């Protein structure tokens, strides 16, 4: 595959918001994210099931145009998360214990359920939708979540995450 063909393939993946399993193994995460940024950060950014232990630093100043998915990885922190998400932020099924590094603003729902979450430190300042943090070692109350985050929707009222 030529370099030009590879770039065209990456562009197609980003435009179509293909899940990472569809991205050829010869394309690394950083290249995928760079192409997403070059395209104006529009659409979903999907990093699910990529066996990541940390988010790439290239993400930390990115604004995601729709949804951001980093669920089903091995993340031990949310450091380097995009700072602004216009849609939903999915970070469920990981191993972090606090929300330090989470985006400051989420325009949709914030999903951090099924993790090892023990502290709301670092929670987003604003979540326009629901804040879903059930099935963690600590059962956070509506009052605890709203004390650290302005939530436009409900807290912990979501059902099982089906992604």
Image: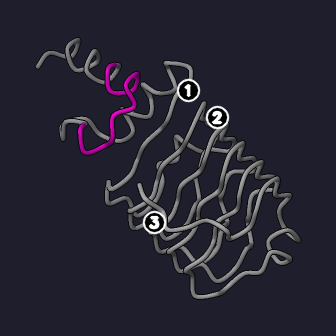
In the rendered image, residue 95, in percent from the top left (x then y), is placed at 47, 74
Indicate the position of residue 46 as horizontal and vertical percent values: 43, 42
Specify which label sits upstream in the sequence, 3 or 2.
2
Q: CA distance from mark 1 to mark 2?
A: 7 Å
Would you identify the image quadrant in which residue 65 lies? top right
Q: Mark 1 and mark 2 in contact? Answer it, CB < 8 Å.
A: yes
Q: Is residue 151 left or right of residue 78?
A: right
| Residue 89 lies in the magenta-colored region | no
Residue range in magenta is 12-22
Cβ–Cβ below 8 Å for labels 3 and 2? no
Describe the element under mark 3 as helix, strand or loop: loop
**Residue shown at the point (29%, 18%) measured from the top left:** 7
What is the crowding at mark 3: few (fewer than 14 residues within 10 Å), some, or many (at least 20)? many
Q: Which residue is mark 3?
A: 75
Residue at 58% across, 34% down: 66
Q: Which residue is mark 1?
A: 41
Tell how many labels. Answer: 3
Reading the image, the residue beneath label 2 is 63
Q: Position of residue 131 (x, y in %)?
A: 70, 62
Earlier sequence position, callout 1 versus callout 3: 1
Residue at image location 77% in from the left, 48% down from the top: 128
Q: Secondary structure at mark 2?
A: strand
The quadrant in which the C terminus is found is: bottom left
Left or right, residue 145 beside residue 61: right
């Amino acid at each position: 595959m030529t370099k030009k063909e590879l770039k065209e393939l990456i562009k197609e993946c980003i435009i179509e918001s293909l899940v990472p399993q569809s991205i050829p193994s010869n394309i690394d995460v950083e290249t995928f994210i760079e192409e997403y940024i070059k395209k104006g950060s529009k659409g979903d950014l999907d990093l699910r099931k990529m066996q990541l232990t940390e988010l790439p630093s290239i993400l930390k100043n990115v604004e995601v145009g729709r949804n951001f998915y980093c669920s089903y990885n091995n993340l031990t922190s949310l450091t380097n998360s995009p700072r602004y998400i216009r849609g939903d932020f999915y970070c469920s099924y990981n191993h972090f214990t606090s929300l330090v590094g989470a985006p400051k603003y989420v325009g949709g729902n914030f999903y951090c359920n099924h993790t090892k979450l023990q502290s709301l430190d670092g929670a987003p300042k604003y979540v326009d939708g629901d804040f879903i943090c059930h099935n963690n070692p600590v059962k956070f109350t509506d009052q605890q979540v709203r004390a650290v985050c302005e939530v436009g929707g409900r807290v912990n009222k979501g059902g099982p995450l089906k992604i």
